[in-house]
Image (spheres, rainbow, N blue to C red):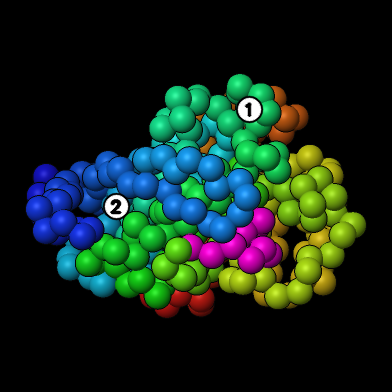
Amino acid sequence: MVRSTTYTIGKCAAALVAFFLINGFTTKRVEFMNVPVGTDHDGKLIEISGLLAKPEGDGSFPAIVILHACGGPNKSNTESWPKFLTGIGYATLSTDSLGPRDLRSCARPRPPMFVPKKIPELWRDFYGSLEYLAKQPFVDKNRIGAIGQSLGGITIRSLAYNKLRAPSGAEFAAGIVLYTRCGVPVGDGNTPYPGEPRFPWLAVIGTNEQPAIIKGGQTALAKAKGVRLHLIAGAYHAFDDHGHQRLREDPFGNSMHYSRKATAEAETVVKEYIAEHMGK
């Protein structure tokens, strides 16, 4: 069954987005500009793309930006999480930071995108996604959160503790980081987080991650304010990625393996957390 609904978006009344109901949720590929965030690294802004999904109806709906891992868009962040989240009443925008830059992985060409000189590009994409969602007539602009997988989680975590702002002043209501390093800075779990984050965030990590990730996350988050840690027993890196049916290692030494059980547990935790901080 396919249904089409059309909405007027943006500043131009002629700009229309058609949504198609496929496999239980409506989806549409969209393009939008990333935004300056007030740093010396802003550089040239570019047009980025994403997959927009929404529940049936006119809204207004709370919404979630989904930020992919180093490997870019895949089934988990463009289909599984959007379908789950729209099913419980949230619109989603799965942002692609690699395709518009002609990249297939954040690790190549070197340096990887999560090093200090590169991550400002992700900050611009992150807030560009927020501002794009906030302009949609079916989105409640005061209830927009974010979920980040690995690299996307690093982006969320880093933005929670700096003074950057979206041009409109919009801010996220909550953040969720999945299987990512949670120490401060990256790889160091001995430095405490600097006070209250700009928005509350949840870290969901499997116990079969690299020991440094587990130890660093537990140490850094133990005394952190406004942060919650949930460990999933037996889960590996990328536990929600259907592409890793067999255990394998990525270029950064992370052992990756899909687990439906771990994914279901993460969905339950995420559902409860965003309902708590963003409303149902």
Work out whether residue 5 can be spotted.
Answer: no
The image position of residue 181, as x and y in percent, is 73, 48
Answer above or below: position of 123 versus 250: below
List the residue tagged with mark 1.
Answer: 107
Q: Residue at x 84, y 65 (%)?
A: 192
Which residue is under mark 2? 53
Q: Magenta residues?
A: 157-166
Residue 123: % across, % down: 55, 51
Position of residue 24 in the picture relative to residue 177 (left or right): left
Q: Which of the two residues, 238 or 30, is positioned nearer the viewer here? A: 30
Give the amino acid at mark 1.
Ala
Q: Give the mark nearest the N terminus, 1 or 2.
A: 2
Inspect the image, locate mark 2, and give the three-letter code of the amino acid beneath it.
Ala
Q: Which mark is residue 74?
A: none
The answer to which image quadrant residue 143 occupies is: bottom left
x and y percent of residue 119 in the render?
62, 44
- Category of crowding for the residue at label 2, using alpha-carbon neighbours closer than 10 angstroms: few (below 14), some (14–19), many (at least 20): many
What residue is drawn where x is 34% and y is 65%? 134
Displayed quadrant of residue 56: bottom left
In reply to whether residue 165 is colored magenta, the answer given is: yes
